[in-house]
């Protein structure tokens, strides 16, 4: 390397620095300013509901089976249509059909947010949100329970357990039937 | 390739040679093509075919092309390989080499799926479903069916523990064939025709429609159903196959040693399935072996050692502390301790109990029998059972000319024997004779010839049988209650093979380990000095006690009378003992009571030290079957706090300063085997005369009883669906007996002053009433057993029927 080259290099370097001072800043001021993610960003999961509030998850464990990081734990159970005392209250029903997910956990210390679980889900119960703030200071806090993952109740939804409101036939839920429109009382 | 002549057909087998997918194979004449293909490693898809059921050709999934049937002409259409026998020179082309076969299989799969629901995500079979798997491997991949599928109401319970989902059924008739051919309970059948064909509940034995599917073997239909049409109410939605860790094991509920598979998830057993052991249970188990596994995780399970404090309360204690207290207490009453280890031990643990009694306690006051027994049994076991090795086997049962059942109901007491006998009877190889009070439903299914006997008078019935070579006699544990019966069996003629079939899984191992007052390990008689010296040398002690010890009844009596000061008790259910009231008095009277048990029991209430031990699922060990076959099993659930009887007893012995030569079950087995079988003369057999028949006094009856397979035993707790399939508790007697007692045939009878049963008229000798041993009421609590004479009075009108 020649002496001329050695002298010229710092000048060229500072030139870059000097030019950049006049460009638009790309640094994001997270956490003071939050920038929206790309619309299909793989963030925290959500367990969706039918329009009447019943859970879409049927506890089939296909998501757990698909998960390459073994982050999901599911236990299924029977929907109970009668109360223990025999009354036909249907208050033991959490999802349409025979089966629901009684225990649902995702361990975000393991999850790699790959989305294979949501591809496996046969009922579209499991989808991903754009929520990415998944940090905490204990291991337990990062195991999300069903209550942490369930979608919020929207207007018109009733918190399960309750009877099927859309139709007596659970197949109608999958066919996309909507809640019957009830005229508001005068 | 050739299938060897199997050992059942010792004669050379005739072989036929055929070609499957261009591979030549020789198989025994009569082999089905589907099985011949397996020999060369070609798997033809199938649903209805099952090697242990008769071929039916119901599902049509196994179609193959047969261009040459061995006579130069081929079949014009694909044939079901599960119904066609191999013929010499036959040419078979499966889906691997023939488009005709592959297209036929794909087409058939499409038909099967036409009405099959898209249930896999909610279906218990999902993940281990032959229909899922074979639809992937031999199906089209995409459905062309867009019309509406046929639907049925679902699920319908065919019994409390078997649920039927008719939409999923592929009409393979495996379940109905199993019920009819293997179990002999044809309660389900294929009903209706065409698209509406479905499995239905068939007529019951009395012709009524829709009787629930009551069978002791119903769980097997769940396992062999090739789809999720039959599912278990107990396992419903519990887990998926990939969640489960499977461990091969051995059933702990009877002395048959049935192979099972234990599936557990997160430290809890989810289900049990039948294992596959052609020598023992083939692929079938009873519902008890399948469903009764929750008993060891009930709320009363003991997890920490307990020691009674000054105030008389049991306090949780550390293991070293509890062992030290137990050792100190036992040392203080050494020489006056009765040992009751119970009948559910593995060979390893039984050996440890035996060594502990002889070495640490220096006594022969040990008796494994936690049930009513008679004076002849100990001598009979010492002379005819201990050390007899592998005697009569399942295989020999199936080939015997005649099998005589004495005081034994295989369907209730030894389910695997029942199934094997039924198979032999159906093959017209074996004739079954039963000496009993009546022809039970199980005996009926065996086509058994009844030799009726009033309980207590079985000896006379036996004498009339003229037993000879080729006969096998199976004697149950109830025989001990009949005076002279075991003595008579001990002197049967040459050529007659005799096997003792106990009810509990640990009974045979206990005999081998010498848990009897007159017997030491390896069939060494207590009475023979050389046998004792031999054993003392092996254990490195100065000597083992030489006086015949007390038996169960004497230990209990003497403890109640303060002549025995200490009791060391294993898993003994007080209500099963011959005299529960006396046993309770004994426990209350004994100054020292040490208990080794899995769950809290009545003994716990009296114990000074309670040492929790592992149930079979949490330990490894070896059960010994009634045949004398060893059935080793590995630990299924690894629970850090679970310890075996062997570890506990070795620990107490060390605290007493009288250590055993082993500490672990594995070493206990090595010790047992190195001590080996005594090669001197066997102990003398029993010799007692039968009692003369005497009719029961007026208002009294002779009781015939045994425990039904599904009853109120503590080993079956926590399984409501299973328990709901128990046979109803009824009393059976002849019409003449009921009328002489003044009991109406639709009424109820009160036995022994307090046990009420609905009345059924059956063909029993007059003056005899049969009742189940422990359904609704444990007869031992009333002092009633097989052959007892008790009062019978009429009760309130029956609410049944
Ligand atoms: S989220 Fe979907 S895939 Fe997972 S258990 Fe529920 S229904 Fe099945
Ligand atoms: S039987 Fe098999 S194919 Fe049918 S729904 Fe169940 S898992 Fe799916
Ligand atoms: S219920 Fe199962 S075993 Fe029975 S016929 Fe249907 S598919 Fe076959
Ligand atoms: S397996 Fe051959 S017809 Fe079903």
Image: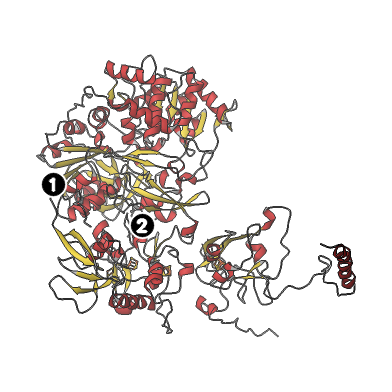
Q: Quadrant of ligand 2?
A: bottom left
Residue sitting nearer the eye, B570 or B711: B570
Disc 2 residue: CB within 8 Å of ligand 3: no
Give the side of residue B302 with respect to residue B473, left or right. right
Q: Which mark is residue B401?
A: 1
Q: Position of residue B374 (x, y in %)?
A: 27, 30
Q: Position of residue B680 (x, y in %)?
A: 23, 22
Helix, strand or loop for disc 1: loop
Q: CA distance from mark 1 to mark 2?
A: 31 Å
Give the side of residue B542 with respect to residue A70, left or right. left
Point out the image quarter for the N terminus of chain B: bottom left
Residue sitting nearer the eye, B743 or B714: B714
Q: Position of residue B626 (x, y in %)?
A: 28, 39
Q: Residue at x 17, y 62 (%)?
A: B17
Q: Which mark is residue B265?
A: none
Residue pointed to by mark 2: B219
Image position of B506 with respect to B91: above or below: above
- Residue ranking furthest to the top: B542
- Residue ranking furthest to the front: A2
Q: Are marks 1 and 2 on the same chain?
A: yes
Is residue B695 visible in the rendered image? The answer is no
Q: Position of residue B79 (x, y in %)?
A: 23, 73
Earlier residue among tags 1 and 2: 2
Q: Residue at x 19, y 59 (%)?
A: B27
Q: Quadrant of residue B216?
A: bottom left
Disc 1 residue: CB within 8 Å of ligand 3: no
């Amino acid at each position: 390397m020649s002496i001329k080259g050695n002298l010229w290099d710092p000048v060229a370097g500072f030139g870059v620095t000097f030019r950049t001072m006049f460009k638009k800043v790309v640094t994001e001021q997270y956490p003071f300013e939050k920038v929206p993610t790309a619309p299909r960003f793989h963030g925290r999961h959500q367990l969706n509901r039918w329009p009447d509030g019943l859970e879409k998850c049927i506890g089939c464990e296909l998501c757990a089976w698909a998960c390459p990081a073994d982050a999901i734990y599911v236990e299924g159970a029977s929907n109970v249509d009668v109360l223990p005392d025999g009354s036909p209250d249907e208050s033991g029903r959490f999802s349409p059909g025979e089966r629901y997910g009684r225990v649902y956990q995702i361990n975000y210390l393991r999850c790699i947010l790959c989305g294979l679980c949501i591809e496996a889900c046969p009922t579209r119960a499991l989808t991903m949100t754009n929520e990415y703030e998944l940090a905490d200071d204990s291991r337990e806090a990062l195991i999300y329970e069903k209550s942490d993952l369930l979608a919020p109740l929207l207007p018109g939804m009733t918190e399960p357990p309750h009877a099927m409101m859309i139709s007596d036939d659970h197949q109608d839920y999958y066919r996309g039937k909507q809640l019957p429109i009830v005229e508001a009382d005068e | 390739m050739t299938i060897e002549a199997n050992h059942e057909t010792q004669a050379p087998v005739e072989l036929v040679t055929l070609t499957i997918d261009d591979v030549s194979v020789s198989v025994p004449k009569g082999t089905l093509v589907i099985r011949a293909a397996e020999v060369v490693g070609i798997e033809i898809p199938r649903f209805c075919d099952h090697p242990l059921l008769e071929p039916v050709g119901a599902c049509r999934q196994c179609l193959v092309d047969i261009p040459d049937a061995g006579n130069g002409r081929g079949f014009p259409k694909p044939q079901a390989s599960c119904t066609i026998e191999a013929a010499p020179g036959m040419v078979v082309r499966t889906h691997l080499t023939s488009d005709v076969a592959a297209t036929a299989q794909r087409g058939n799969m499409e038909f099967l799926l036409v009405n099959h629901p898209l249930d896999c995500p909610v279906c218990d079979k999902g993940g281990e479903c032959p229909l899922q798997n074979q639809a992937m491997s031999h199906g089209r991949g995409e459905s062309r069916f867009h019309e509406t599928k046929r639907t049925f109401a679902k699920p319908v319970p065919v019994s409390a523990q078997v649920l039927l989902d008719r939409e999923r059924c592929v009409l393979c008739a495996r379940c109905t064939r199993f019920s009819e051919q293997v179990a002999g309970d044809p309660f389900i059948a294929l009903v209706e025709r065409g698209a509406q064909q479905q499995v239905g509940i068939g007529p019951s034995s009395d012709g009524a429609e829709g009787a629930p599917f009551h069978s002791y073997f119903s769980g097997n239909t769940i396992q062999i159903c090739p789809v999720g049409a039959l599912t278990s109410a107990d396992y419903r939605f519990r887990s998926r196959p990939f969640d489960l860790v499977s461990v091969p094991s051995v059933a702990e509920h009877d002395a048959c040693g049935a192979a099972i598979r234990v599936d557990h998830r997160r430290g809890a057993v989810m289900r049990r399935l039948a294992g596959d052991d052609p020598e023992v249970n083939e692929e079938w188990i009873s519902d008890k072996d399948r469903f009764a596994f929750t008993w060891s995780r009930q709320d009363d399970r003991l997890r920490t050692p307990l020691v009674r404090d000054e105030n008389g309360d049991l306090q949780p204690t550390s293991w070293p502390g509890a062992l030290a207290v137990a050792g100190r207490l036992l040392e203080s009453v050494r020489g006056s301790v009765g040992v009751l280890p119970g009948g559910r031990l593995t060979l390893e643990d039984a050996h440890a109990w035996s060594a502990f009694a002889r070495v640490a306690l220096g006594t022969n006051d040990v008796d494994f029998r936690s049930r009513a027994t008679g004076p002849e049994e100990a001598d009979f076991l010492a002379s005819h059972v201990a050390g007899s090795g592998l005697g009569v086997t399942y295989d020999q049962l199936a080939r015997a000319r005649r099998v005589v059942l004495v005081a034994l109901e295989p369907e209730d007491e030894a389910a695997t024997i029942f199934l094997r006998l039924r198979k032999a009877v159906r093959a017209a190889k074996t004739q079954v004779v039963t000496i009993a009070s009546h022809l039970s439903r199980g005996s009926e299914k065996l086509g058994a010839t009844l030799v009726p006997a009033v309980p207590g008078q079985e000896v006379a019935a036996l004498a009339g049988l003229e037993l000879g070579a080729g006969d096998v006699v199976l004697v149950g544990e109830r025989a001990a209650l009949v005076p002279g019966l075991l003595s008579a069996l001990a002197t049967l003629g040459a050529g007659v093979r005799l096997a003792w079939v106990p009810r509990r899984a640990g009974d045979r191992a206990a005999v081998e380990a010498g848990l009897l007052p007159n017997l030491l390990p390896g069939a060494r008689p207590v009475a023979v000095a050389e046998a004792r010296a031999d054993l003392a040398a092996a254990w490195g002690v100065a000597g083992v006690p030489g006086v015949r010890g007390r038996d169960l009844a004497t230990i209990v009596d003497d403890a109640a009378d303060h002549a025995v000061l200490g009791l060391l008790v294993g898993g003994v259910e007080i209500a099963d003992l011959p005299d529960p009231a006396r046993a309770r008095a004994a426990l209350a009277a004994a100054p020292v009571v040490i208990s080794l048990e899995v769950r809290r029991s009545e003994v716990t209430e009296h114990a000074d030290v309670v040492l929790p031990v592992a149930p079979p699922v949490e330990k490894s060990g070896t059960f010994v079957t009634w045949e004398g076959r060893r059935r080793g099993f590995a630990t299924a659930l690894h629970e850090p706090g679970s310890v075996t009887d062997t570890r506990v007893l070795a620990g107490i012995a060390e605290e007493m300063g009288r250590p055993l030569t082993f500490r672990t079950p594995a070493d206990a087995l090595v010790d047992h085997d190195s001590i080996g079988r005594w090669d001197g003369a066997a102990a003398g057999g029993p010799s007692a005369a039968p009692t003369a028949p005497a009719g029961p006094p007026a208002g009294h009856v002779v009781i015939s009883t045994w425990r039904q397979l599904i009853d109120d035993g503590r080993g079956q707790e926590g399984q409501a669906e299973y328990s709901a399939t128990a046979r109803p508790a009824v009393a059976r007697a002849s019409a003449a007996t009921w009328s002489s007692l003044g009991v109406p045939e639709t009424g109820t009878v009160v036995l022994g002053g307090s046990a009420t049963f609905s009345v059924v008229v059956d063909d029993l000798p007059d003056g005899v009433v049969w009742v189940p041993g422990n359904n609704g009421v444990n007869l031992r609590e009333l002092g009633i057993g097989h052959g007892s004479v008790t009062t019978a009075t009429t009760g309130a009108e029956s609410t049944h029927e």
